[in-house]
Amino acid sequence: MEEAEFKVDLIQAGYTEDEANTLLRYLSQDFPNSSVQEKQELIRRLMAQEPYAYIAGYQPFLNLSIQVNQHVLIPRPETEELVQLILKSNPTSVPLQVLDLGTGSGCIALALKSAKPQWKVHAIDLFEPVLKVGRTNAQRLSLPVDFYLFPMEHADRWRGEEMHLMVSNPPYVPLEMASKLDARVIDFEPNTALFSPQNQPLFYYECILKWAELHLKSQGCLWLETDADGHENTRQLLLRSTIFKFVESFVDFRGNPRFLKAQKK
């Protein structure tokens, strides 16, 4: 009887019947031995719109289970597509030096390392609690990735190796769009991983461009995830830089312009 009551509670909280059924199935899988009181607390958190990934503590990402908490963005299906595009573009076993800029949970870096063990993968982020999540995931998954506490804005201070490949899914939501985001996003996920600075929608892409100028090898590739609405402006930023042989756009599974690949001259 309690499951039927929980389902009613979730629907009253704004979930569709299909979403409620899915969430209840997940709860039974992830918390099989929970008491009635514990289940009530889990349902309360869902009714408060807390994302399920934070409640369960993980998010599936390609073939990996990525631990997450409220210090990091929950990995999205679009970002899975970005990783798949990179792997499709690099079918050989050639070892590469790879840098993930603004790594968050480490999902991109770890998925690339999982698929390409011969790659030397590095990842940076600005906040130590964020890097702790990435390092924990790397240790748990036995995937050796080097994580560095390093600001994206300071490309000129990097003293590491030159890279064959750079990738980033930076904060790109314009701050003025905050009021339009779902409560499950704006109330729970870290704003620092979501938003570009006010009136500077290309701020992080400009930082990434500086990394490519200074630390991407000749013939190396830069891969970016972008906001659909800001995609063309980001593409034009890369084209204006003159350091690339070509800049190519890709759409996501919804048909929105989402990804950019740029090869350095």
Image (cartoon, helix red, strand yellow):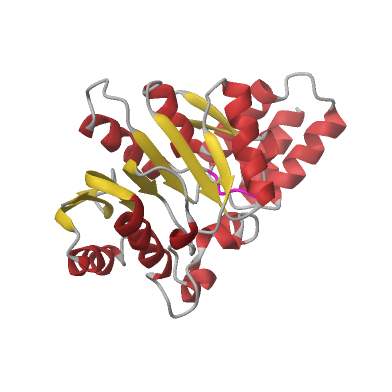
180 with respect to 242 (left or right)? right
149 with respect to 248 (left or right)? right
In the depicted view, which residue is nearer to us: 263 or 178? 263
Residue 16 pos. (x, y %): 53, 45
- Direction bottom: furthest residue: 199
Check residue 73 for magenta coloring. yes
In the depicted view, which residue is nearer to us: 154 or 196? 154
Quadrant containing the N terminus in the rendered view: top right
Check residue 182 for magenta coloring. no
Can see residue 264?
A: yes
Can see residue 50?
A: no
Residue 55 pos. (x, y %): 69, 39
3 with respect to 168 (left or right)? right
Residue 230 pos. (x, y %): 31, 67
Image quadrant in which you'd find residue 38: top right
- Direction left: furthest residue: 245
- Direction front: furthest residue: 159
The number of discs equals 0
Q: In this rendering, is residue 99 above or below 24?
A: below
Q: In this rendering, is residue 179 above or below 101?
A: below
Image quadrant in which you'd find residue 192: bottom right
Residue found at x 22% / y 25%: 91
154 with respect to 165 (left or right)? right
Magenta segment boundaries in residue numbering: 70-74
Residue 153 pos. (x, y %): 48, 64
Residue found at x 76% / y 30%: 2
Residue found at x 61% / y 57%: 190
Query: Magenta-highlighted stretch: main secondary structure?
Result: loop
